[in-house]
Amino acid sequence: MLCQDRIEPRPAWQPGQVTLGRNLLAALGRVTGDAVAVIEDDDWYGPTYLAELSKYLDEAPLVGEGLARYYNVRERGYIEHVNARHASLCSTMWRHEQITPRVINVIDNSREPFYDLAIWRTTDDFVLTLTGRDIIGIKGMPGRAGIGSGHNRGSCRNPDPDLTKLREWIGDDADFYESYRR
């Protein structure tokens, strides 16, 4: 069963703050199920993403999709990464009891600027699928600018002025992004 609950930690974000760790800790403190999936509200997920990725939890306590793909809708460009040893946080799922304590430790103690890298280094028992391709990191949407790869201007350096690549990746869902231009 998919349970959704919106958590809005206070105080709200202010310019210059990095709130990812605080937000993750607030969310993890409310988990009651067996698994945790990190879903980011500005990314595109295929309709079977959660079901498909969760199947791998039978094989390992930490799973994710590697070879991250990002698309900047304002700049009309994309990039395909070669992360074949870890998944981006937005495409990571884990068994709650086994991995959540490690995630909390990473947030509390890691000096690594990217939690995803540090989390994936906590275990050798993981499945990283390089198939399915059911997530696209969407950048360039209105709202607060992020710091992750793909957020910075020019990092999605393969041009796609007519959305051909985005349509290849997500089909007719690309129509939603048509209004976001440079």
Image (cartoon, helix red, strand yellow):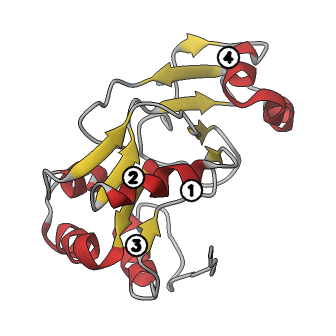
The reply to whether the C-beta atoms of the residues labelled 4 and 3 are less than 8 Å apart is: no
User: Residue 144 in the image: x percent, y percent?
Assistant: 59, 54
Query: SS at mark 4?
Result: helix
Q: On the image, which quarter does residue 62 sit in? A: bottom left
Outermost front residue: 58
Q: Are marks 4 and 1 in contact (CB under 8 Å)?
A: no
Give the residue type at disc 4.
Answer: Lys
Q: Which mark is residue 165?
A: 4
- Position in image of residue 11 (x %, y %): 50, 84
CA–CA distance between discs 1 and 2?
Answer: 10 Å
- Mark 2 or mark 4: name the one nearer the start of the chain: 2
Tell me the kind of residue under disc 2.
Answer: Tyr
Q: Which residue is mark 2?
A: 56
Q: Earlier in the sequence, mark 4 or mark 1?
A: 1
Numbered circle sitting on residue 50: 1
Left/right placement of residue 95 relative to residue 5 reads: left
Q: Quadrant of residue 60?
A: bottom left
Q: Residue 35 appears at what percent x and percent y?
A: 42, 72
Q: Residue at x 75, y 22 (%)?
A: 167
Viewer-closest of 149 and 163: 163
Please tell me whether mark 1 sits on a helix, a strand or a loop: helix
> In the shown orientation, is residue 181 left or right of residue 61?
right
Marks 2 and 3: which is nearer the front?
2
**For the residues marked 4 and 3, what is the alpha-carbon distance in whole angstroms?**
32 Å
Q: Amino acid at mark 3?
A: Leu
Q: Which mark is residue 24?
A: 3
